[in-house]
Image (cartoon, rainbow, N blue to C red):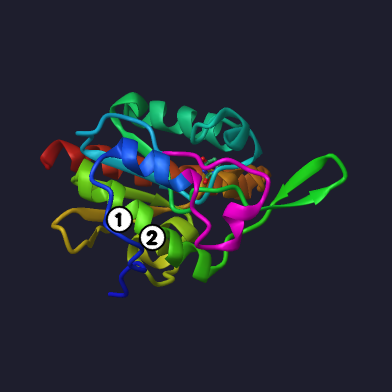
Amino acid sequence: EKGALEFEERPDTLEAIDKAIHGCRKCPIGALDNHAVMGEGPQDASLMIVGEQPGDQEDQAGRPFVGPAGQLLDVHLEKAGIDRRAAYVTNAVKHFKYVQRGKRRLHQNPGAKEIDTCRWWIESERAIVKPKLVLAMGASAARGLLGKTVSISKVRGSPIPLEDGSELWVTAHPSYLLRLDGPAREEQARLFDADLAAVRERLEDL
Ligand code: URA
């Protein structure tokens, strides 16, 4: 497995990570007009939920998953019986990557190199929180955990062991659902719900 870049001494508290990510310029995203968004949730959470990167609203609020994708996530978590407040919620990439179009900032996918650079921070968060189960939503999140790209349709539904003994579950990103409608949306919502239900069940055994 390809590890994260070694920056300096690994921060050993969440507060230290929070401080450090704000000044991080290890990739070009940090130099945009944005703020780093730290993960949130209990330091001893069994479940870590990982998204791609903060969006426009998360960047302004300074909190992960508060915008449209976060609201949809909340609905599905509740349906699955997963308490979001008991989970540590974070992102593979800490800064919002966008292109300015008039007044709007349009989301851009982070590149593989940017995700791999930012692994330093998610690995640092994992080393402190030590979740038993990590749920990666979307391909960028999965890459942030694995250091390589996987196909969501191929890996969803069965856990991937991580080197620290925890397990990684991969599912789609809620933003993907937001971009669909009609039967396609229903089908993807059903798969997303099934993945979350499997995670809820698995957490009871861990
Ligand atoms: N999408 C993400 O991946 N993360 C967030 O925090 C918000 C939207």
Range of residues picked out in magenta: 22-38
Secondary structure type for disc 1: helix
Q: Is residue 131 visible?
A: no
Residue 126 or residue 26, whichever sits in front: 26
Q: Are marks 2 and 1 in contact (CB under 8 Å)?
A: yes
> Residue 1 falls in which quadrant of the image?
bottom left
| Coordinates of residue 163 in the picture (x, y in percent) | 18, 64
Question: Residue 129 location, x and y as percent?
Answer: 23, 41
> Total label count?
2
Locate residue 118 relative to residue 124 in the image: left or right: right
Membership of 200 in magenta stretch? no
Kindly report the distance in space between the C-alpha atoms of the residues bearing marks 2 and 1: 6 Å
Q: Is residue 167 left or right of residue 187?
A: left
Where 159 falls versus 56 (above or below)? below
**Relative to 184, 168 lies left or right:** left
Residues packed near mark 1 inside 10 Å, few (<14), some (14 to 19) or many (20 plus): some
Q: Name the residue type under label 2.
A: Arg
Q: Residue at x 33, y 41 (%)?
A: 16
Decide if residue 156 is on the left or right side of residue 105. Answer: left
Amino acid tagged 1: Glu
Query: Can you give x and y, in whole percent of width and height, for residue 6 in the image?
Result: 33, 67
Q: Nearer the viewer, residue 66 or 105?
A: 105
Q: Magenta stretch: residue 31 in it? A: yes
Q: Which mark, residue 123?
A: 1
Q: Which residue is mark 2?
A: 119
